[in-house]
C-alpha cells in the first residue's frame, strides 16, 4: 500500500465577511445553519466565480486535491479533523459548473454546460444551484429541465429559492430528481418563474458525492475513519477528481480544517 | 448466504475485495412535494417523508386503493444502490444524517402499502383481509414489523380512534389497542400514526383491517407495513449524527434485496425539515 497525505482547509468566517479575497485571506461565507453550503470558493487558492461553463478535473483551481501528484485511483482511508462547530462536509467530485444565471428572469436560461468528464452516464451525479451573488428577498419556484442517467431528456424538477436561507452567497440548493431517476447527465434549461427582485448570480453545479466527514461536536481533533466512524465508507477517488466540499454546519461562523489520509 | 468474518474481512470488502461491492449512497429530502410546500410536521409526532421530493427517491405517489408490495422500484423509494449478488447479503455498515431542524429520522423498509381509505366513512376497512392475496415478500416472519396510518390529505376534526386487526408472528389474529385519530395533531397531511400491537406481540405478518369512526372529512389515508432499519438523531439544527454499526448497536443491519428504503421523521420542533444523509453498504 502506498500512502500519501494531503492537507486542506475550509473556512467560513463571518468576521472577515468584508475583507477582500487575497492569497492570504479566504473567501468568506455566512453559513446558513443546517443547509448545504458550496465551499468551492472558501478555500485557498480562491477560485474565481466560473467565468464560463467548464468541466473540471484535478488541475482545476479550487480543488482540495490540487497538486497532489497522484495518478492512480486511491481510497480515502481516514481523516483528522477539527471544526469550530458540529457539522458535515460532503466530499464530492465537482464535474461541471457554470455561473451567470439571473434570478429576475421569468424566461428560459440555458446553462450550455460541457459533457460530464467523469461518471459520464450521470448515474449518482447530483445537481445543485450554487449562489455566487446574493439573490432577492422574494421566494420563487425554479424549474430545472435535465437529462437523466439513461440519456432521457426533458426530465424536470422544481425547487424554490430567494428569500432568507435560500439566497445567500455560497448556498447550494440541491435539486431533487424526478421519480425513477438516479442521476443527472446534463442540465438543459433553468427557468426562474418570478422575479426575486435582485438578479444576483447563480449557476448550476453537477457533482458526485464521494464521502462525508461528520463531526458531531465542536472542537478537538477527531480521528475519523471507517472503523471508528465519522467517515462514510472507504471510497475510491478518481485520480482526475476535482475534490471539493459541501458543508452543512450547526453554527454560522465555522472554521474547519483537517488532513485526509489516502491509500491505494 | 454470507457473513462478515471479522474486522479485517469487513475492511477488505469495504475496499472492494472479496466481492464486497462497497456502496455509499447519499440522500436528500426537501420540504416540498413537487411544487407545493409540505405540511409543517408536528413536534414529537411522526411524519412520513414518502411523498417529499428528494434525491434519489423522487417523490412517492399517493398509494392507490388495495394492498401492494413496495420495492426499490416503487416511486418514493431511495434508489441508486445495487441489490446484492445472488447468494450474498447486503449489510448497512454506516449511516449519517443532518438537517435544518432537530429530530429523529427512521430509515425503514416499506414492505406494503394500502391506499384509498376515507376518513369520513366509519367502520372496519379491509387492508389485506383475513387471507391475504397480497402477502409480504420481505420479513415474512413478521418479526419487528410495524404498521402505521399514513395521512396524505387532511382528514376531519372529529376525534376518533383507530385500531388494527392483524396476524402476529405466529399467524394468530390479534387486535391492538386504539389510538387517537382525527382532529388536531391526528389529522394533518403527512402525519404517520403508529398502530400499536396487542400485548406480548412483537411483529406483524399481515394487517387484516383497521377500524375507526368517521372524522367528518374523507381526506386520504393509507396503511403501511414497515421494518425498522436504523434510527438517526439530529440533536440540533445542522448537528449531524453518525451511526457506526460496526462498533455500535444494534449490530450491522441487513438490507433485503429489493428493499423499499423509506424515511419517517419525528421532529423535535414544529418546523419544516430538510434532511441530508448517507448510507454505506458492503456485501458478504
Image (cartoon, coloured by chain):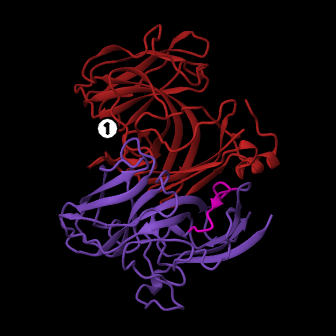
Between B59 and B50, the one lying in front of the other is B59
Q: Tell me if A201 is positioned left or right of B71 in this view.
A: left
Q: Is residue B129 visible?
A: yes
Crowdedness near tag 1: few (<14), some (14–19) or many (≥20) residues, C-alpha within 10 Å: many
Q: Identify whether A26 is placed above or below A238.
A: below
Q: Colour of chain A?
A: purple
Chain on which label 1 sits: B
Q: Position of residue A239 (x, y in %)?
A: 63, 67
The chain whose colour is red is B
Element assignment for label 1? loop
The residue located at (34%, 32%) in the rendering is: B151
Quarter in which the C terminus of chain B is drawn: top right
Q: Which residues are magenta?
A: A229-241
Q: Identify whether A181 is placed above or below B240.
A: above
Between A211 and B129, the one lying in front of the other is A211
Between A42 and B129, the one lying in front of the other is A42
Q: Tell me if A210 is positioned left or right of A180 in this view.
A: right
User: Overall secondary structure of the magenta stretch?
Assistant: loop
The residue located at (77%, 39%) in the rendering is: B4
Q: Identify whether B90 is placed above or below A246.
A: above
Quarter in which the N terminus of chain B is drawn: top right
Q: Position of residue B79 (x, y in %)?
A: 49, 42
Does the magenta portion include B67?
A: no
Q: Position of residue A104 (x, y in %)?
A: 20, 70
Q: Is residue B100 visible?
A: no
What residue is disc 1 on? B189
Amino acid at each position: 500500500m502506498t500512502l500519501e497525505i494531503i492537507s486542506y482547509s475550509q473556512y467560513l468566517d463571518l468576521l472577515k465577511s468584508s475583507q477582500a479575497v487575497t492569497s492570504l485571506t479566504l473567501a468568506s461565507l455566512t453559513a446558513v445553519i443546517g443547509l448545504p453550503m458550496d465551499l468551492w470558493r472558501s478555500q485557498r487558492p480562491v477560485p474565481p466565480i466560473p467565468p464560463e461553463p467548464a468541466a473540471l478535473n484535478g488541475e482545476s483551481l479550487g480543488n482540495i486535491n490540487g497538486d497532489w501528484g497522484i495518478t492512480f485511483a486511491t481510497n480515502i482511508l481516514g481523516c483528522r479533523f477539527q471544526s469550530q462547530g458540529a457539522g458535515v462536509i460532503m466530499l464530492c467530485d465537482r464535474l461541471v459548473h457554470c455561473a451567470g444565471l439571473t434570478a429576475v428572469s421569468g424566461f428560459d436560461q440555458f446553462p450550455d454546460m460541457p459533457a460530464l468528464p467523469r461518471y459520464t452516464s450521470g448515474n449518482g451525479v447530483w445537481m445543485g444551484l450554487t449562489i455566487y451573488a446574493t439573490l432577492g428577498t422574494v421566494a420563487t419556484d425554479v424549474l430545472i429541465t435535465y437529462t437523466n442517467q439513461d440519456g432521457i431528456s426533458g426530465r424536470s424538477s422544481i425547487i424554490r429559492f430567494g428569500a432568507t436561507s435560500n439566497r445567500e452567497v455560497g448556498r447550494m440548493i440541491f435539486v431533487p430528481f424526478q421519480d425513477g431517476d438516479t442521476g443527472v447527465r446534463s442540465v438543459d434549461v433553468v427557468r426562474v418563474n418570478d422575479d426575486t427582485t435582485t438578479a444576483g448570480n447563480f449557476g448550476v453545479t453537477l457533482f458526485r458525492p464521494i464521502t462525508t466527514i461528520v463531526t458531531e461536536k465542536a472542537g478537538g481533533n477527531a480521528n475519523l475513519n471507517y472503523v471508528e466512524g465519522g467517515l462514510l465508507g472507504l471510497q475510491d477517488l478518481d485520480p482526475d477528481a476535482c475534490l471539493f466540499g459541501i458543508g452543512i454546519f450547526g453554527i454560522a461562523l465555522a472554521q474547519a480544517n483537517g488532513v485526509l489520509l489516502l491509500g491505494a | 448466504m454470507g457473513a462478515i468474518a471479522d474486522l479485517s474481512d469487513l475492511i477488505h470488502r469495504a475496499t472492494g475485495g472479496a466481492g464486497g461491492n462497497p456502496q455509499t449512497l447519499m440522500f436528500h429530502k426537501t420540504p416540498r412535494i413537487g411544487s407545493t410546500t409540505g405540511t409543517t410536521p408536528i413536534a414529537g409526532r411522526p411524519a412520513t417523508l414518502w411523498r417529499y421530493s428528494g434525491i434519489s427517491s423522487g417523490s412517492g405517489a399517493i398509494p392507490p386503493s388495495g394492498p401492494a408490495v413496495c420495492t426499490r422500484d416503487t416511486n418514493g423509494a431511495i434508489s441508486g444502490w445495487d441489490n446484492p449478488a445472488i447468494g450474498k447479503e447486503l449489510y448497512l455498515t454506516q449511516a449519517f444524517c443532518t438537517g435544518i431542524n432537530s429530530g429523529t429520522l427512521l430509515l425503514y423498509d416499506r414492505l406494503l402499502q394500502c391506499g384509498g381509505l376515507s376518513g369520513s366513512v366509519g367502520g372496519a376497512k379491509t387492508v389485506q383481509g383475513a387471507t391475504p392475496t397480497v402477502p409480504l415478500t420481505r420479513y415474512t416472519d413478521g418479526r419487528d414489523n410495524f404498521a402505521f396510518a399514513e395521512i396524505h390529505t387532511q382528514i376531519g376534526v372529529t376525534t376518533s380512534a383507530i385500531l388494527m386487526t392483524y396476524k402476529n408472528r405466529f399467524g394468530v389474529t390479534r387486535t391492538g389497542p386504539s389510538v387517537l385519530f382525527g382532529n388536531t395533531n391526528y389529522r394533518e397531511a403527512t402525519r404517520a400514526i403508529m398502530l400499536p400491537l396487542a400485548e406480548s406481540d412483537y411483529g406483524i405478518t399481515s394487517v387484516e383491517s383497521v377500524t375507526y369512526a368517521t372524522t367528518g372529512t374523507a381526506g386520504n389515508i393509507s396503511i403501511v407495513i414497515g421494518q425498522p432499519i436504523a434510527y438517526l438523531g439530529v440533536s440540533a439544527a445542522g448537528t449531524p449524527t453518525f451511526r457506526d454499526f460496526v462498533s455500535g448497536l444494534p449490530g450491522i443491519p441487513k438490507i433485503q434485496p429489493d428493499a423499499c428504503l423509506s424515511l419517517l421523521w419525528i421532529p423535535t420542533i414544529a418546523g419544516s425539515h430538510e434532511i441530508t444523509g448517507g448510507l454505506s453498504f458492503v456485501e458478504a
